[in-house]
Image (cartoon, helix red, strand yellow):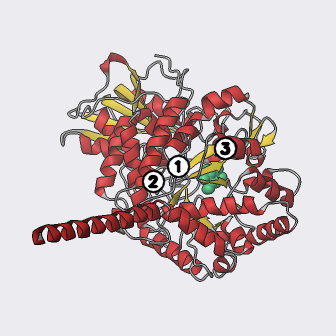
Amino acid sequence: MKFLNKTLLFVTAGLIFLGFSFLISSNKIVENKQSNDERVENLLRQMTIDEKIGQLVLVDKNAIQEIDDIARYGAGGLLSGGGDKPEANTPAGWLQMVRQFQDAAQKSRLKIPLLYGVDAVHGHANVPGATIFPHEIGLAATHDADLVRKIGVITADELVATGIQWNFAPGLDVVEDTRWGRVYETFGSSSTVVSDLGAAYIKGLQSGSGKAHVIATAKHYVAAGAMEWGSSTNSQFKIDQGATLVDEKTLRAKHLPPFITAISAGVESVMVGHTSWQGTEIVGSRYLITDVLKGELAFKGFVVSDWAGIYEIPGGEYHAVVTSINAGVDMVMLPTDYKNFIENMQRAMAQGDVSQERLDDAVRRILSAKFKAGLFERVVGGAPSLTTVGSQEHREVAREAVRKSLVLLKNSHESLPLSKNAAHIIVAGSAANNIGKQSGGWTVEWQGIDGNWIPGTTILDGIKNAVARSTRVDYSESGEFSGEQKLADVGVAVVGESPYAEGFGDSDHPMLTKEDLETVARVRAASKKMVVVIVSGRPLDIRVDTGDWDAIVAAWLPGSEGEGVADVLFGDYPFTGTLPIEWSVKK
Ligand code: GLC
């Protein structure tokens, strides 16, 4: 009997223990499942109206009049617009700058960390020394989603190492007009390719390796790739910041899918572009932002407006603020007038022009993204270390991307691959020895840089490193090789576009310059076989010129690892790139 009692006691005790542990664990699961939501609600309940308004503010770091304003106004975010760099434009300089701003935010009553956003659209290219990948148009030519995801992971690592947790990328515009200056910031003209590669990049950026989680931004919502030539609202531009006139059927069939896929991939922010649709600025369109994006597509992240975009809404600044916030914009890239915006929002709340529910919804979305990014746990830095920025391992991935991005446009008489043992090779062209040109816009400066001011390898470097010791390689940017009696075995002319960004790249007839064509002609006259490598952000009109060009390669904007071009020119790797956008070339 005693034994039975003991067993009964033991079993009962065990059951009680199991019961409690289940309760605790289930409660813990429930607690964890609600942890971000719960934390958001807890914080929201404590916030004053002014603290809530502050979270909607996204200011360019150069516009902060005094650093105490960050806590005084409870700013939600800062950004470095293109070219807005720290005093010391180094990885350590970026980390120090962001840390300084985050420390300033910690002086606010509720210590809500800042979001700090940059345009790391082809690697963290604001920073000399970072790995600079091919721009999106070149990644599209690789049609390699896993490689694009990997590039997202690396970009996240290099961003978080410098204290940044928000990237205004990927561009998900589906391009219709190659005269637009932002073609290279897109994955091309196929909605399916844009969707697939955009989702891959987002998954990479937002998962990162280790703890490097960076908020991705699906931009520019929506149909910015379909703007009409000549419709720009900016007098300096032709098509950028213009009007999209497509009907709703086309918008939904071609331009919305990349955002649908991005939402499925978990994108945490969406940027509304400088575009109007059927006469209405999209940044003021309640239908497109609230009804479609947040309602129909159930986007749960936050919507950010583009650079001063809300003020393109006609009717004065107060009307612009009220209209954009009521349309569903959550965070406003002002990017300068934060005091004026806050006063307008205080008036809008006082007059009931913006409801408490709308304000709370915007703040809830912003805080949720901050909690998800781990900002409250790890305000700045943390894994990975600064040494990851521009590491050899990262550069190898960039070099692979360069190889896979190359598209063979013409190859008559089997001119390619070239022999590494050719006796004499001449190299010429404005983009042969110029890392700035091969990187394009959004590189250290907004409009890019010309010349070799950042680490990396030029296309010429790659050619020199690929050939046999016995091969003579001569270089002349203009293609003038005086005193040569014999024709060189091979001539390589590397020509193309100078760096530009946004509307400054709008061009009514994208083509090679007269100087480039003259250089090509000189190389043609001085070599038995000529290869032309085109470095450009989009297809260029070369139809009239290519009759005696033996081979033509589209290299797009390869970034810092120019050596990848020679890897394929000399046959170490095959051409696998395909055109992400139509490019007609006379064979
Ligand atoms: C620019 C661009 C946008 C970029 C933003 C911040 O105007 O339209 O793509 O993310 O400003 O630099």
Which residue was labeled with disc 3?
Answer: 295
- Amino acid type shown at disc 1: Val
Q: Amino acid at mark 3?
A: Gly
Question: In the rendering, which numbered label is found on residue 14?
Answer: none
Q: In this view, which residue lies farthest toward the front?
A: 1
Above or below, comparing residue 213 to residue 495 in the picture: below
First along the sequence among labels 3 and 2: 2
Label 3 residue SS: helix
Q: Is mark 2 within 8 Å of ligand 1?
A: no
Q: Residue at x 22, y 38 (%)?
A: 471
Relative vertical location of residue 245 with respect to residue 184 in this rendering, above or below: above
Q: Nearer the viewer, mark 1 or mark 3?
A: 3
Q: Is residue 72 above or below residue 262?
A: below
Q: Nearer the viewer, mark 3 or mark 2?
A: 3
Which residue appears at 71% of the width and 38% of the height?
239
Mark 1 neighbour density, 10 Å: few (under 14) some (14–19) many (20 or more): many
Residue annotated with mark 1: 267
How far is disc 1 from disc 3 in space, using C-alphas? 16 Å
Residue at disc 1, secondary structure: loop
Give the x, y percent position of residue 223.
66, 36
**How far apart are the two marked residues, 2 and 1, measured between alpha carbons?**
8 Å
Q: Residues within 10 Å of mark 3 (few under 14, many from 20)?
A: few
Residue that mark 2 sits on: 206
Q: Is residue 557 visible?
A: no
Q: Residue at x 67, y 43 (%)?
A: 295
Q: Is residue 182 above or below residue 31?
A: above
Q: Amino acid at mark 2?
A: Gln
- Distance CA(mark 3)–CA(mark 2): 23 Å
Horizontal and vertical percent for residue 400? Answer: 32, 42
| Mark earlier in primary sequence (1, 3) | 1
Between 365 and 557, the one lying in front of the other is 365
Residue 68 visible: yes
